[in-house]
Image (cartoon, rainbow, N blue to C red):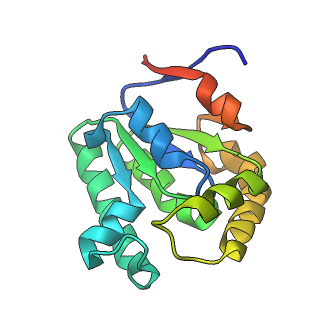
Amino acid sequence: MVDMKIKIPNLSLVVIIGVSSAGKSSFAKKHFKKTEIVSSDECRAIISDDENNQAVTKDAFALLDYIIAKRMKNKCLTVVDATSVQKESRKSLIHLTLKYSYTPIAIVLDIPEQICQDRHKARQDRNFDDYVISRQYQDLKRSIRYLKHEGFRKVYILRSPEAVEAVTGIVRI
């Protein structure tokens, strides 16, 4: 793999898209400041003290959207760390980019399903069944080619752990 740099405008909403255990959080932490990252898991934890509590998902995403809007209002680069594999879950994000004149950027971690399943089994911090990853993977595959049509200005697709590792930096333009 050749070293790769991802270019993003300063006023961007970067949506890291991928199934559970694809490496979204690790990617975000490696390339962005902690304060730039808005995580759906952390929003669940803030609301319920449990980042795995799916019963609070609606409230967690309302909080996620609220934080994103406040960051955009204050002209801060913002990174979304959530699966975002379904069009419906991305719709409010695109709406916010239009409202605040931000550039929507998608970084897709299209990691093979079996790798995600293996990583999931090794994780102590996740408590859902394997079928969830399979369903997310199908949703991701169905929606990947429509991301630009949805409004994402730039779409970066990383199809292997090696491709993810080849990203050596985020260049702000």
Q: Position of residue 73 (x, y in %)?
A: 24, 45
- Quarter of the image containing the C terminus? top left
Q: Quadrant of residue 88?
A: bottom right
Residue 105 position (above or below residue 129): above
User: In the drawing, does residue 90 fall left or right of residue 36?
Assistant: right
Q: Nearer the viewer, residue 47 or 160?
A: 160
Residue 90 position (above or below residue 13): below
Q: Quadrant of residue 39?
A: bottom left
User: In the drawing, does residue 3 fall left or right of residue 73?
Assistant: right
Q: Position of residue 155 (x, y in %)?
A: 64, 36
Q: Residue at x 62, y 32 (%)?
A: 164
Residue 26 position (above or below residue 1): below
- Quarter of the image containing the N terminus? top right
Q: Residue at x 69, y 73 (%)?
A: 130
Q: Position of residue 171 (x, y in %)?
A: 45, 18
Q: Nearer the viewer, residue 76 or 113?
A: 113
User: In the drawing, does residue 138 fall left or right of residue 31?
Assistant: right
User: In the drawing, does residue 54 fall left or right of residue 6?
Assistant: left
Q: Residue at x 48, y 20 (%)?
A: 169
Say whether residue 102 is visible. no
Number of labels in the image equals: 0
Residue 110 position (above or below residue 3): below
Q: Residue at x 62, y 52 (%)?
A: 18
Say whether residue 56 is visible. yes
Residue at the far left in the pictured view? 74
Q: Nearer the viewer, residue 142 or 23?
A: 23
Q: Quadrant of residue 71?
A: top left
Q: Nearer the viewer, residue 56 or 100?
A: 56
Q: Position of residue 75 (x, y in %)?
A: 25, 36
